[in-house]
Image (cartoon, grey):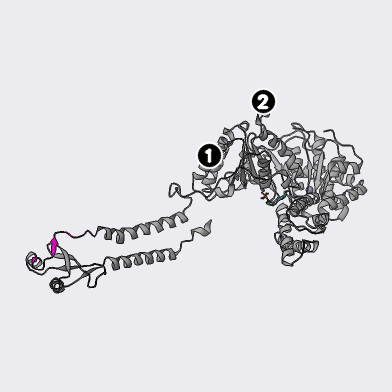
Amino acid sequence: MQKHHKFSIWYFLLAIWGVLLIQNFLANTFAVKTVPYSEFIEYLESGRVAEVAVGPNPIQGRLVPETEGDRDQYFKTVRVATDMAELLNRYKVKYAGTIESTLVRDIISWVLPIFIFFGIWFFLMKKMMPQQPGFMSLGKSKAKIYKQEDTGITFEDVAGVEEAKTELAEIIDFLRSPDKFTDFGAHMPKGLLLVGPPGTGKTMLAKAVAGESSVPFYSISGSEFVEMFVGLGAARVRDLFEEAKKNAPCIIFIDELDALGKARGISGPGGHDEREQTLNQLLVELDGFDANIGVILMAATNRPEVLDPALLRPGRFDRQVLVDRPDKEGRKKILEVHLQKVRRVGAIDVDQLAAMTAGMVGADLANLVNEATLLAVRADSDRVEMPHFEEAIERVVAGLEKKNRLINPEERKIVAYHELGHAIVSISLPDTDPVRKITIVPRGIAALGYTMQVPTGDRYLMSKTELLNKIAVLLGGRAAEQIIFDEISTGAHNDLSRATDIARSMIIEYGMSEALGQVYLKGEDTARFLLPGASRRGDYSEETSRLIDREIKSIIDNQYEAALAILNGRRQAIEQAVAILLEKETISGDELREILGETSPPE
Ligand code: ADP
Ligand code: ZN
């Protein structure tokens, strides 16, 4: 926002110039000429004086213009001892103690410029201090609530996000016939958080939910709240919910929730009062309504990790729907949707196009189709053909490379083996969370690729073996890289930090180390909550500390060996799975288990 505040001397020069202009205009219009007394007498003699007002000393008066049609002229003069009444009577001039009031003139020439000055001053102040509470807080809010009676978008228009659609189907059912659900006493989730990179179709999905269930769609963007005056954001949120409740069933959609819902305190002291107030108001509204009246709140973010934890608590945005970058199959479907809108399409190999556009999201693909169409028009072609697409891809890819969103084929291979390493170790070991799917879609929400494991249920107790297996799974990624490439990469640092955390907890919290025995050594490390990364040490000796480190290393080493052994025994399966993963970018847990000859876990 800083750039708006730059104070400019030009504003003042402009203001002064403006005032001078006005004064000049007024002076010409209501000019009062100061004349010598002798000239006044001459005017009297020539009969030009229409009327005068005589004071104790000054005389002001109006002159008839010299030529017909001109403006009247005003004059003033200072009397030289004469008998005024006698003189004026002689020339038959109307005279009085007063004259036409100059009040209007005075107002225009003095008060108006002052108002203009103040106006400019206020304008500048407002620009300089948008956060000043109470000051000029009557300014108009930037955050607009958009209402669409009918979004006109259906699930057909949003392609390649099948998982998200499945999760949203229930909401549509509810909005279509809320009574059915409330009859059963069912409680709908209030808040749904769509999580995914920009351009993956989160807004479209929210609109599609409204479109599919034919309810109004209210939307507002989190980033627009940030520039507002204190109190306004909160008021807006209140208005939004009030309006929505009146029009239930309906959907409220907040785009860029992270701009508004960043964890409080992150912005530092004296930071964003406004955002905090707005966020608090949002929390109040979330708590204060019952989804069963038919208002569903949806929000989108690409940075779920910065959200205030209060937003994610049960009864608030407690359901998250992942809308990640599309894999090859998904891109194919999205391309088909957008190609449908082009009227003159030649023979397009959509499958090949999908293969050529790894890493692109829905918005990129929509843009690509448009770009290819434009190229075709410009080239005077009959239809949009593959060469147009090839050229368009080159352009779009160049842009994406600059944004660092594509990964090269070598990296892609490393990521594929790495992710398979996690998955295969997990499938091979008992009591691990079942693998649901593995993807290597470039630069997805989880940076490079991920292995999706679904916990089978809430766990309150975990055995030592389970914890060790968890560590082995985390190390499986790096182990696979070691085996295949005889080289390790930086891609595993998050894995290592999580594995180390588990190992440390096993030793100092759960008493699972033989060398240290059944002791609790964690200490009261409340400071950790204030300063991330602050010392986690409890009260124990140097020697114990060294022993802990040695034990952590030994656990990690052993589990790494275990992971290596598992993967070494399954080289063939790895190669088989990698071929599929590189081709399709996604492989399901079941497919992988089949390759490995393992049975599926119980649902
Ligand atoms: P987000 O809200 O995730 O940033 P949008 O929903 O605003 O993304 O998508 C922007 C545009 O990209 C849409 O208008 C649409 O044309 C295109 N688009 C994105 N995702 C998809 C998809 N899954 N299917 C079809 N078009 C998509
Ligand atoms: Zn990993």
* Magenta-tinted stretch: 89-101
Say what secondary structure mark 2 lies in.
helix
Image: 98 above or below 562: below
Residue 389 visible within the image: yes
Residue type at the position of mark 1: Arg
Say what secondary structure mark 1 lies in.
helix
Residue 540 visible within the image: no
Name the mark nearer the viewer: 1 or 2: 2
Residue visible at 72% across and 52% down in the picture = 362
Residue lying furthest front: 68
* Crowding at mark 1 (Cα within 10 Å: few <14, some 14-19, many 20+): some
Q: Residue 17 versus residue 5: which sits nearer the camera?
A: 17
Comes first in the chain, label 1 or label 2: 2
The residue singled out by tag 1 in the image is 238
Mark 1 touching mark 2, by CB under 8 A? no
Q: Is residue 243 left or right of residue 458?
A: left
The residue singled out by tag 2 in the image is 183
Q: Residue 600 versus residue 568: which sits nearer the camera?
A: 600
Displayed quadrant of residue 265: top right
Residue type at the position of mark 2: Asp
Please provide percent x and percent y for residue 535: 66, 45
Asked whether residue 493 is drawn in magenta, I would say no
